[in-house]
Image (tube, rainbow, N blue to C red):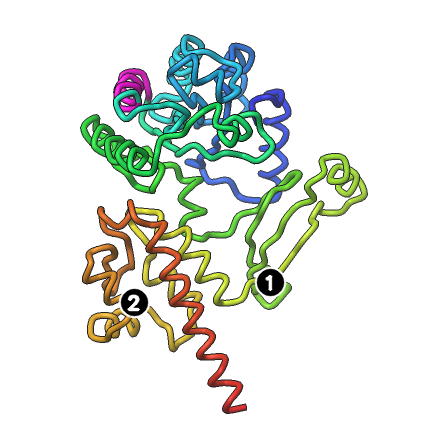
Amino acid sequence: TPSLCKPHHIQQIIAAISQSATLVDNIEITMEANPTSTEMNQMKQFKQAGINRLSVGIQALNNDDLKVLGRDHNVEQAKVAIDIAKSYFPKRTSIDLIFARPNQTIQDWSTELKKAMTICDHHVSLYQLTLEPGTKLYKQVHQQTLHLPDDDAIAQMYQNAIDIMHHYGYQRYEVSNFAKQGAESRHNLSYWTSNDYIGVGPGAHGRLIIPSREYQRYAMVQCLSPNQWMSMVEQGKLGIQKMQKQSELERLTELILLGMRTQEGISSHRWNTIASPNLQFNKDSKESENNNTLLHHLIQDQFIAIDTHSIRPTFQGISMLNQIVPSIAMYLEDYYSQEHDIQSHNG
C-alpha cells in the first residue's frame, strides 16, 4: 500500500516524475491508503507532498467480516479514517467496499451500503469478493467452513447497490465505480479508454507507444521479485522483465475488455485510431444495423448501443458484461482469422 511509504519519499517520486514529464496544473495524483491510525495520521504530510486524491480501503462496515477478510482495522477506525480523508481531500476521497462476502445476505448488504452513504465522500468503488488461491479465506470457502452467497443473490446485491447509489446521487460510470457529478477518477479512466500508462515497481504493468520502435504499442511487465527489480534498477536498467508488441487484434480486444466497462463505452475516434480501414467504426456500425451479425443481435436485445459516435453498453447491458464482452471479443477474433485466411489464400 503506497501510504506505507514515507511522505517525503512520495514527494521525491513526484519531483522525479516532474523532471521527465510535464505535470499540468490540475493534475490528479491519487494514493491508496488503509484506514489505520498510523497511515491516516500522516495525511497532512501526504497532501503537502503533492497527493490530492485519496482512495481508502474500507472493504466492510462489519467487524466480523473485516476479521474474515483479514483486515487490520475495525469499523470505528474506518469511520475516523473517512472523516480525516474528507478533511484533507474534500470531494476527492474514495472508499472501496466489497460485497458477496461469506454468509452475507441481500438485506445485510443493502443496510451496510446505506450506512456507508451517510459517511462517505463523492466516490465509491464496489467490488465483488474475489477469492485468491493460497489465502486462508480461499481454503475456508473450499472446505465449506464459510459459504458465499449464490449467483442469484449476488446479482440482486449488485442491482440493489445500483439503486441505492442512484438514490444518494451517485452515477455508475463504470461497472464497479460510482461518483457524484465531476468526481470521477481520471486515473481509472485512462485505463478504460486505453490510453498509454507507465508501470513502475515490482510486478507493475504498462502500455506504451514507443516512437523509436515505429510507434508500435508495447505491453510491458516489470520484474516481479522486489530484490531482483531493485538490483536491475541500481544497474541502470528499467526493471522490465517482459516487453511484447501488441497486434491490432490484441489492442482492439483490450479496448473492448476495458472500454465496455464504462457508461460512455468506446468512442469512434479511439476505435478508428487502432482498427484497420476494413474494420472502421462507421462502416461496421452501418453493417450491424442490417446484417445478421453478433453486433446486430446485441443491439436488438438492447445490450449495446452503437452509432457514429461510440459503441457502449446500455444500462441493462453493463450488468451483463461477463456475457457480452467475450462474445464481442470472439467476433473480433473470427474477423481477423478470416482476414488472415483470405491473405494466405491470395498470397
Please tell me how crowded label 2 is: few (under 14), some (14-19), or many (20+) other residues with Cα within 10 Å. Answer: some
Identify the residue at horizontal 30%, vertical 41% (top origin).
173
x and y percent of residue 239 in the render?
A: 71, 45
Magenta stretch in the rendered image: 109-120
Q: Residue at x 33, y 55 (%)?
A: 324
Which residue type carries mark 1? Lys
Where the N terminus falls, by quadrant? top right
Residue 114 magenta: yes
Q: From what the image shows, is residue 79 above or below residue 176?
A: above
Going from N to C along the chain, the mark reached first, 2 or 1, is 1
Residue 84 visible at all: no
The C terminus sits in image quarter: bottom right
Q: Is residue 56 magenta-colored?
A: no
The mark tally for this picture is 2
Main SS of residues in magenta: helix
Give the image location of residue 118, x and y in percent. 27, 16
Residue linked to disc 1: 245
Q: Which residue is mark 2?
A: 294
Q: Residue at x 61, y 42 (%)?
A: 204
Above or below — where is 149 with respect to 250? above
Judged by depth in the image, the label closer to the viewer, 2 or 1, is: 2
Let me know if residue 148 appears in the view. yes
User: Residue extending furthest bottom?
Assistant: 346
**How dense is the environment of label 1, judged by Cα within 10 Å: few (below 14), some, or many (20 and up)?**
some
Residue 98 appears at what percent x and percent y? 40, 28
Of residues 136 and 315, which is closer to you in this image?
A: 136
Q: Is 14 placed left or right of 80 in the picture?
A: right
Farthest front residue in view: 144
